[in-house]
Amino acid sequence: MSWPRYALATFVATLAAVGLPGCDGRPAQAPGPVRTPKESAEQASLVIMDTRGDVIIYTDTEAQGRLAYEAALARLKTIERLLNRYDPASELSAVNRAAGGPPVIVSRTTARAVIQARHLWQTTGGAFNPLVGSLVALWTQCEAERRLPTDEQIQSALLLLNMDEVEVAEGGAADGTSSCRLARAGMQLDLGGMAKGWAAQEAVAAIRRCEGVRAALVNLGGDGACWSEPGGGPRGTEEPGASRPPWRRPWRFGLQDPRTVSRKILAPLEATRGAVVTSGNTYRYYEIDGRRYSHVLNPRTGRPVENCIASATVVHPDGGTADGLATACMVLGTGKSIELLERLPGAEGLILELSEGRLLPCPTEGFEQYLPSRKLEF
Ligand code: AMP
Ligand code: MG
């Protein structure tokens, strides 16, 4: 079917590695090739985050699509430049270096990210804790030294997790500048637990500020945010047989099998707007003495989480919130996670528990609206 009123501008980019906050800090690699489908007139090379990503934009004209795409990339690059804690030149690194000292002037973007992270810390009762940076550093160092941290080391790191000791002002000073201060020496912010969802959301927002945009998806390694014009509605709400242009159809995400690194899709998920984010231990973990430990740390114990959750998928209108909640679910365990998600307006989720090689799906009540088949079967 053709849609003569609109020229379709679709851009699918392969993004190469550089290490965003919370990613494993590997050094930057050369940009990967960028693939574009034949509808696109755009070719671009780009380097973003340590993940493969896709940006798809529907616009009225191809030129508008190109501009919107460039706006998304610029936003992603800015976020990476500001918040990559493995980059000594980032604002987050400057804030971390100054811990225990005076406030550091930061951009509004950085201030907003820290404020949202603090909000997530409150919402999740501390399960999501953006100050895990010092604990992450401890476990990373111990992994390199092939030993477990000592109790004293864990106790010292636990003293650095109080988000009430983070002062952050967004344009708050008399001259409108934003600033951030970690009150205690040694404190380290690590926004990796919400970075991908937050960045995807910000990129979608940047796309939406452009002219002629009908729909957009920014997918960073399976975590993504999307938007489309009203009228798409959840599947099944349109008249039977009514055909819709692609930008009025829901975006499709994949629920991945957490038992394998093959990225096998267990079930498709569909969303018209908002973000779909998954946390799990499939791809990233600490390995010490032949044993794997979760890369999600429990801020109460200072140790990697140990429970039967293989993955936690969260759908939420806001990308940073979806990402932070998914990480928090890994800490909270199934019961408390479902309770939390049911309590939060707009949040839905699916926890996959693993027992003797079998997956047990534990969804919130409204999660099935994101399943085209309305059923969880695998
Ligand atoms: P995600 O993959 O979104 O669950 O994020 C995991 C990353 O978030 C880790 O690699 C750490 O950088 C960071 N992190 C680990 N534990 C926590 C936690 N309890 N709260 C917030 N961030 C965390
Ligand atoms: Mg997360």
Image (spheres, rainbow, N blue to C red):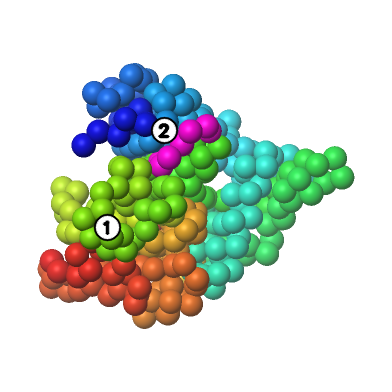
Q: Residues within 10 Å of mark 2 (few under 14, many from 20)?
A: many
Q: Does residue 299 appear to the left or right of 248 in the view shown?
A: right
Relative horizontal placement of residue 321, taking residue 292 as reference (left or right): right
- The quarter of the rendered structure image containing the N terminus is top left
Let me know if residue 215 is in the magenta part.
yes
Residue 28 visible somewhere in the drawing: no
Is residue 258 one of those drawn in magenta? no
Q: Residue at x 58, y 31 (%)?
A: 89
Query: Could you say where residue 43 lies in the image, as x and y percent from the top left?
Result: 34, 19
Q: Nearer the viewer, residue 240 or 18?
A: 240
Instruction: Label 1: state its secondary structure.
Output: strand
Q: Residue at x 23, y 68 (%)?
A: 374
Question: Which quadrant of the figure has residue 178?
Answer: top right
Relative to 116, residue 33 above or below: above
Q: Which mark is residue 269?
A: 1
Q: Which residues are magenta?
A: 210-216
Asked if the beta carbon under badge 1 is closer than 8 A to the nearest atom of ligand 2, the reply is no
Residue 213 higher or lower than 194, as above or below: above
Query: Which residue is found at the position 60% from the left and 60% from the top?
Result: 118
Where's residue 165, x and y in %?
69, 61
Q: Position of residue 23 (x, y in %)?
A: 40, 44
Q: Position of residue 60 (x, y in %)?
A: 42, 31
In 3D space, how far apart are the residues under numbered discs 1 and 2 (Cα atoms)? Answer: 24 Å
Residue bearing mark 2:
59
Q: Is residue 245 visible?
A: yes
Q: Nearer the viewer, mark 1 or mark 2?
A: 2
Q: Residue at x 26, y 49 (%)?
A: 243
Q: Are marks 1 and 2 in contact (CB under 8 Å)?
A: no
